[in-house]
Image (tube, grey):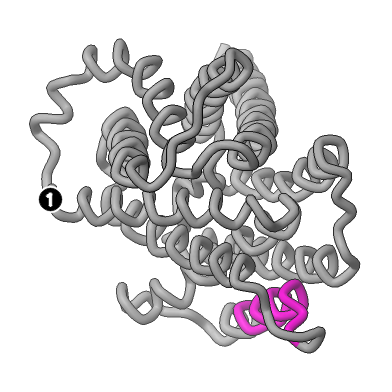
Amino acid sequence: MTSATSTIATSDQRRATLLGIGLMLLGVGVFSVGDMVGKMMVATLPVGQFLMLRAGASLLLLSPFAWRERAAFASTPRPWIHVLRVVLSSSEVAAFFFAVIYLPLADIITYYLASPIFVTVIAAIVLKEQVDLRRWIAVGAGFIGVLLALKPGAGTVSWSALIALAGSFSFAILMVVTRALRGTPQIVLGASQISGTFCFGLALTPFGWAPLSVQDIALIVFGGCITVVALFSVNRSLKLAPASVVVPYQYSMIIWAVILGYIGFGDIPAWHTLGGAAIIIASGLYIFMREQAAGHAEPVMDPPPA
């Protein structure tokens, strides 16, 4: 009986793990589709208007869940840290979509994949976490990957690339702050993050507003749905399977960025972008595995904004 029970438990765990991996891949894929839709929209709409309307659509979809968990919002501790997190989140989302006007998706995703490398440096300096020599070597290799992707020797690095890299750095700080708030309910983190984006977009609307077509409205609603579906998929994935199993699958975002960038915009990544991405991913995976071994790996690594 004990053996049979153990076999059933192992089988259930295996199914849960496979489902968690599937949901992570789904969430990353859906986020990537959202990136492509966003790139299409900011080509004709001001970034502030797009951010406000898309976040508004997401909040409408989240409102029933937020109302059900409303008590969690009233009892949230350390409100100033939450405010800092919202500011960081709004800044990196804005940087992403300002950069995406001028850069291919694969380039921007490559810079954002460097976030775990930045997290290691920030955590060592700010949180005083111990970083061994092998992880510092991996960090150094990751920075070489970033430099290769930027290719500064070809001339002056573009402002759009620097904006994307700044967004990646903000995203890294966001992950460190989220680490400090890991006990906060996901609905509070998600709703506050999207609300911050809405307010940030609203503040930018006086500087530019474009008339909306029926297609624009449909894409905005679609983008809002994408954000909610992707967030729920990633969060559910992390509940079903260990982070050490599912988080590395987030690096599949670069594959989606290359495919969707080519389909949607005819973008073909340069060799130095793909080479830099390969080095960054290898460094990030090594750092993640070392942090798992050390017992303080980041439990949630939210993908870049959809």
Q: Which residue is rendered at x = 82% and y = 47% of the image? A: 258
* Few, some or many residues within 10 Å of mark 1 (<14, 14–19, 20+): few
Query: In this orientation, which residue lies closer to the viewer: 226 or 128?
Result: 226
In percent of width and height, residue 170 lies at 43, 63
Q: Relative to residue 296, is residue 210 depicted above or below?
A: above
Is any atom of residue 47 visible in this view?
Answer: yes
Q: Which residue is rendered at x = 14% and y = 54% of the image? A: 80
Identified by mark 1, the residue type is: Arg
Magenta highlight range = 138-152
In percent of width and height, residue 86 lies at 29, 48
Name the quadrant containing residue 164.
bottom right
In percent of width and height, residue 95 lies at 49, 57
Q: Secondary structure at mark 1?
A: loop
Query: In this orientation, which residue lies closer to the viewer: 197 or 50?
Result: 50
Query: In this orientation, which residue lies closer to the viewer: 288 or 111?
Result: 111
Number of labels in the image equals 1
Q: Which residue is mark 1?
A: 78
Q: Relative to residue 131, is residue 16 depicted above or below?
A: above
Is any atom of residue 229 visible in this view?
Answer: no
Q: Which residue is rendered at x = 34% and y = 52% of the image? A: 178
